[in-house]
Image (cartoon, grey):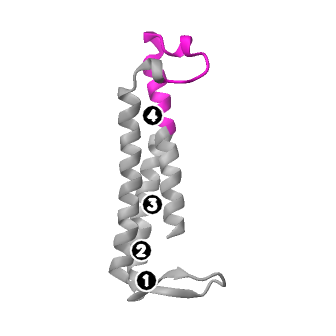
């Protein structure tokens, strides 16, 4: 495993832990929308609020997994990168796929972290 995969797993576990922790601290009615002055003007039940948070996280995780699958099945002629003659030869193909996979995991781990911070 590379850095990106570790980062994604750590962020995923952090998001699960933080969601579970906040569940017990949250009131029964959650502010879900705020006006320009920062005052809440929309509310929803706690269960609905956390359900929407989990749905967004599942979509981000699903897109991350889909990106990993696309990296594996994309034809080499469609990959645009510098020094493609070097990286796309069979001897370097595995290293290239590992680097692209690690980058994808890191990218979607960062996106998941930003979504969690937003909630």
List the residue tagged with mark 2: 21
The residue sitting at 60% across, 16% down in the picture is: 83
Image coords of residue 81 (percent x, y)? 57, 23
Residue 8: percent from the left, percent from the top? 45, 48
Circle 4 or circle 2, nearest the eye: 4
4 or 2: tag closer to the N-terminus: 2
Q: Is mark 2 on a helix, strand or loop?
A: helix
Residue 14 - label:
3
Q: Is residue 101 left or right of residue 37?
A: left
Among the two numbered marks 3 and 4 on one chain, the one whose residue lies closer to the N terminus = 3
The image quadrant that residue 45 belongs to is: bottom left
Instruction: Name the disc covering residue 36, or none.
Output: none
Q: What element carries label 3?
A: helix
Query: What kind of element bears circle 1?
Result: helix
CB within 8 Å, label 3 to label 1:
no
The answer, for residue 2, to whether it is visible in the render is no
Q: Which of 101 and 72 is in front in this view?
A: 72
- The earlier-in-sequence mark between 3 and 1 is 3
Label disc, if present, on residue 101 of the rendered structure: 4
Mark 3 to mark 1: distance in Å? 17 Å
Magenta range is 79-103
Alpha-carbon span between mark 3 and mark 4? 21 Å
Residue at the image point whose x is 35% and y is 35% from the top:
69
Checking the image for residue 25, the label placed there is 1
Asked whether the residues under the numbered discs 3 and 4 touch, taking CB atoms below 8 Å apart as contact, a structural biologist would say no
Q: Callout 3: few (<14), some (14-19), or many (20+) C-alpha neighbours within 10 Å?
A: some
Q: Do the residues labelled 2 and 1 touch (CB within 8 Å)?
A: yes
Between the residue at mark 2 and the residue at mark 1, the CA separation in whole angstroms equals 7 Å
Mark 4 and mark 1 lie on one chain; the one further toward the N terminus is 1
- The residue lying toward the viewer, choosing from 35 and 103, is 35
Q: Where is residue 26 in the image (x, y as percent from the top left)?
A: 43, 83
């Amino acid at each position: 495993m590379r850095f990106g995969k570790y980062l994604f797993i750590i962020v995923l576990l952090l998001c699960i832990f933080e969601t579970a922790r906040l569940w017990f601290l949250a009131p029964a009615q959650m502010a879900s929308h705020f006006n320009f002055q920062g005052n809440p003007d929309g509310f929803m039940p706690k269960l609905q609020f956390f359900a929407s948070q989990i749905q967004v996280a599942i979509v981000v995780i699903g897109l991350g997994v889909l990106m990993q699958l696309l990296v594996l099945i994309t034809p080499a002629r469609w990959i645009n990168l510098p020094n493609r003659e070097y990286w796309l030869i069979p001897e370097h193909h595995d290293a290239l796929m590992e680097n692209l996979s690690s980058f994808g995991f890191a990218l979607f781990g960062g996106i998941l972290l930003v979504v969690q911070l937003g909630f």
